Amino acid sequence: GEDVEQSLFLSVREGDSSVINCTYTDSSSTYLYWYKQEPGAGLQLLTYIFSNMDMKQDQRLTVLLNKKDKHLSLRIADTQTGDSAIYFCAETSNTGNQFYFGTGTSLTVIP
Amino acid sequence: GAVVSQHPSWVICKSGTSVKIECRSLDFQATTMFWYRQFPKQSLMLMATSNEGSKATYEQGVEKDKFLINHASLTLSTLTVTSAHPEDSSFYICSATPRGRETQYFGPGTRLLVL
């Protein structure tokens, strides 16, 4: 399958911005997603970006896509303690038949 | 490590029949397993959360009598689609959380086509 990679851990101070990075290998990726997993819960979709877009902003969340480098990032502005969770990036190919998930980045927000 | 398998990888069945999908954690014990459904060209939708030895917790709008979930052991959860209809055709994916950890590992998915 395709490789989707993320760093495992990130710590930030409350009020700072968080940037979570993701790289992928599938050049035919169509949609790229960011999910949030809170302790003991399933995935919740945060946002997604279509591959022909460079940026998408939704309130405190900004997604940047560098298709040439196959690099996706999620920026959380004014990070709060409630943002502490594991964040997964995922991508689907043009057919949409398979999801490929990263290993998840555990974000810890320090008060 | 941390491999999750699903069986079958794809299945075609007639309308009205029941289909069982297995999700196994191959090299770890999973206290919690999640079942998701993916509609064509849409995101994954969480269907239910399954804890070993207890009843599954279903998300709002998911019929528990239609999608039967059994978490029989720490390495196996099954999803049975009862009396399947063409609108149940979808991609079903499970994930498993190892004991004592928060992250989850995803299976490769099962493609169901109901004729």
Image: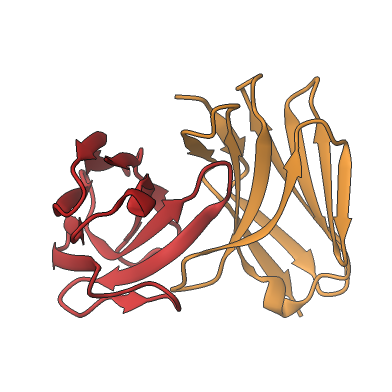
Chain colours: A orange, B red
Q: Position of residue B17 (x, y in %)?
A: 14, 52
* Residue in the image at 42% along x and 54% along y: B37
Task: Identify the residue at horizontal 50%, vertical 38% (top origin).
Answer: A99
Q: Nearer the viewer, residue A20 or A34?
A: A34
Pick the residue in front: A52 or A1.
A52
Residue drawn at (20%, 43%) of the image: B26
Residue under the image location 72 percent in, 71 percent down = A109
Q: Assign the N terminus of chain A to one quadrant of the image.
A: top left
Give the position of the C terminus of chain A as an image quadrant: bottom right
Quarter of the image for residue B101 reads bottom left
Horizontal side of residue B6 vs B107, given as left or right: left
Q: Is residue B3 above or below residue B97?
A: above
Q: Is residue B8 visible to us here?
A: no
In the rendered structure, the answer to whether residue B38 lies left or right of residue B85 reads right
* Most foreground residue, B51 or A56: A56
Above or below for B11 versus A105: above
Residue farthest toward the left in the current orientation of the protein: B72
How many discs appear?
0
Residue B59, image x and y in percent? 42, 75
Left or right of B46? Residue B107 is left
For the question of whether residue B76 can be seen, the reply is yes
Residue A21 location, quadrant: top right
Residue B34 lies, with reference to residue A55, above or below; the image says below
Q: Position of residue A94 (x, y in %)?
A: 60, 27
Q: Nearer the viewer, residue A38 or A34?
A: A34
Residue A50 percent coordinates (x, y): 75, 38
Q: Is residue B40 left or right of residue B61?
A: right
